[in-house]
Image: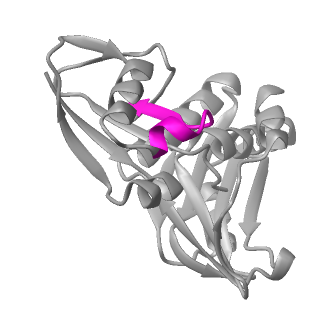
Amino acid sequence: MKLHVKYFASLRESVGRAGDDVELPCERLSVAELREHLAAQGIEALAETGKLRAAVNQVMAEPETSVGDGDEVAFFPPVTGG
Amino acid sequence: MSISIQTADFDAGRECADLLAGRHDVGAVASFIGVVRGDGGVAAMTLEHYPGMTEKSLAAIAAEARERWPAVAALRVIHRVGRLRVGDQIVFVGVAGGHRGEAFAACEFIMDYLKTRAPFWKKEETEAGVRWVEARDSDDAAAARW
């Protein structure tokens, strides 16, 4: 399956780019598993901090939220708007 | 229910007047304005957001406010993005309702939820350099009250 991954704020700066197109041999996985996979692929900023949040298809997600083909998955630090 | 993400400034008086325009069921308008504070040598900040998700999350927060306080007649949320200086307005929330109770409550609820759920991030500029603002536990506690 193919996913589009996005990074925001300090995470985007640490990764050095705004996103990645990712191809995986499985049909589904969890947000936490995707994060582990990307960290293992060399995106160290995803391994470093436990404080990151995620969204799937632009809705706040949990580590156990399931991700499938064509989904947009974003990782970012806790939000600080307002 | 109207939501805007914009770089431009806003006129809170005009926004409140628009909430009332043509209505006879409104007895109260509560509004909140967030402003760039100059603590700790902050001179300016840049607000980044997640286009698409920002609009969706604010619409969901506004819809939840209307569900919780059905007497809310109209509401308006404006959040600025881009580079803002100390004293600049960042965010406006205006709620019109039949009575002050729902207007005050819904306005505070929207701000508390926005602070913890809408994808905005602040990067502050000081003489020492730039730094990303850290999320506060007190904001999570404020959102958890509702």
Is B58 situated above or below B86?
above
Q: Residue furthest bottom?
A: B127
B122 relative to A15 in the view: left or right: right
How are the residues colored? one colour
Give the image location of residue A81, x and y in percent: 63, 55
| Magenta span includes B61 | no
Between B62 and B75, the one nearer to me in the picture = B62
Please report the residue visible at 13 percent of the width from the left and 21 percent of the height from the top. A1
Is B73 situated above or below B121?
above
User: Which corner quadrant holds the C terminus of chain B?
Assistant: top right
| Magenta span includes A53 | yes
Give the image location of residue B107, x and y in percent: 74, 45
Give the image location of residue B77, x and y in percent: 58, 54
Q: Tell me the magenta residue range.
A: A45-56
Give the image location of residue B21, x and y in percent: 58, 59
Residue B37 seen by the camera: yes
Residue B18 seen by the camera: no
Please report the residue visible at 51 percent of the width from the left and 45 percent of the height from the top. B1
Which quarter of the picture shows residue B131? bottom right
Please report the residue visible at 43 percent of the width from the left and 32 percent of the height from the top. A55
Between B89 and B138, the one nearer to me in the picture = B138
Between B32 and B117, the one nearer to me in the picture = B117
